[in-house]
Image (cartoon, rainbow, N blue to C red):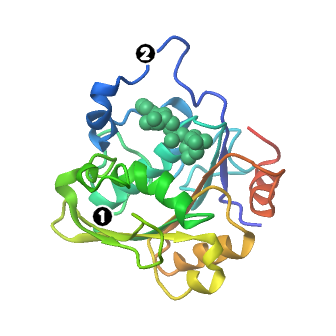
Amino acid sequence: MNKTRHTSTAKGLRPPEGKEPISIALRHERHNLIHYRPYPKQRRFHDVGGDHAAGPDCPPGCDGRAHRERMLMGANQSGKTYCGGAEVAFHLTGLYPEDWTGLRFVGPTRGWVGCDTFPNVRDGAQRILIGEPKLESEWGTGLIPAAAIVETQRSGAGVPDLLDHVVVRHKSGGFSTAAFKSYDQGRKRWQGETLDWVWFDEEPPEDIYTEGLTRTNATRGAVWLTFTPLEGMSRVVHAFIEDVGGLR
Ligand SMILES: Nc1ncnc2c1ncn2[C@@H]1O[C@H](COP(=O)(O)OP(=O)(O)OP(=O)(O)O)[C@@H](O)[C@H]1O
Ligand SMILES: [Mg+2]
């Protein structure tokens, strides 16, 4: 099993007790990438995508080099999708924070965003990256800054308000793309592209995970997984936890 895996779990993901909730009035502004302030576990999750201080959540023998495969496991509403989405938005735009030490691409990137079904990818990852799916006037209020969104292509899959992909201006002047996929499309629809990154928002079946990882082999890209365990431990998650030697 690959020894570069890294796990991070829910403990510490939530803000400290008593911290003010995000007010409705500030919602749009706060969802923008510029205002993202990762909670400690979210920060650790980003950090281990680059050279980092090895910790108990790394596999034994970790030499502090970037983990190509990462997972963030957490309770409902603990900030998993927001964290995975922020990572996507940084790689699409190149607008990494000054103190960013995680995974970094120098130019525009191509990646896929997946969830179990199309409605779930729309209501989860798409909503957090782009804005409320049902209201096109709200597109651009998610983590990807409105000014960076060049094109939003609606899906022809018959799922209302689902995007097929989004084209994003990278700070270098080039263009990045992110396409929305579902696990229930089956493995064959996860073949054929060379990608820089893949984000699995919720646990994928093993064949889809392997296929997604394979898409990033040629670029030496990365994959990350954000999820709440729903029905026990899937094979993909079990492999991560075995590598690390238990939950951290
Ligand atoms: N670092 C952060 N700073 C401010 N708000 C945050 C942060 N992380 C998460 N949130 C907010 O917490 C809420 C829940 O986040 P998110 O949707 O990512 O949770 P989740 O764990 O994916 O939830 P679910 O279990 O429903 O999939 C969102 O409103 C999000 O904006
Ligand atoms: Mg979520």
Neighbour class for label 1 at 10 Å: few (<14), some, many (≥20)? few
Q: Is residue 29 left or right of residue 21?
A: left
Determine which residue is flagged by label 1: 106
Residue 186 is left or right of residue 100, and the answer is right
Q: Residue at x 75, y 62 (%)?
A: 236
Callout 2 amino acid: Glu
Q: Are marks 1 and 2 in contact (CB under 8 Å)?
A: no
Secondary structure beneath dot 1 equals loop
Q: Ligand 1: does it lie within 8 Å of the C-beta at label 2?
A: no
Q: Which residue is mark 2?
A: 20
- Using the rendered image of the protein, determine whether residue 50 is visible from the camera's viewpoint: no
Q: Is mark 1 within 8 Å of ligand 1?
A: no
Residue 201: where, in percent of width, then height?
Answer: 57, 56
First in sequence: mark 1 or mark 2?
2
Q: Amino acid at mark 1?
A: Val
Q: Quadrant of the N terminus?
A: bottom right
Front-most of 47 and 36? 36
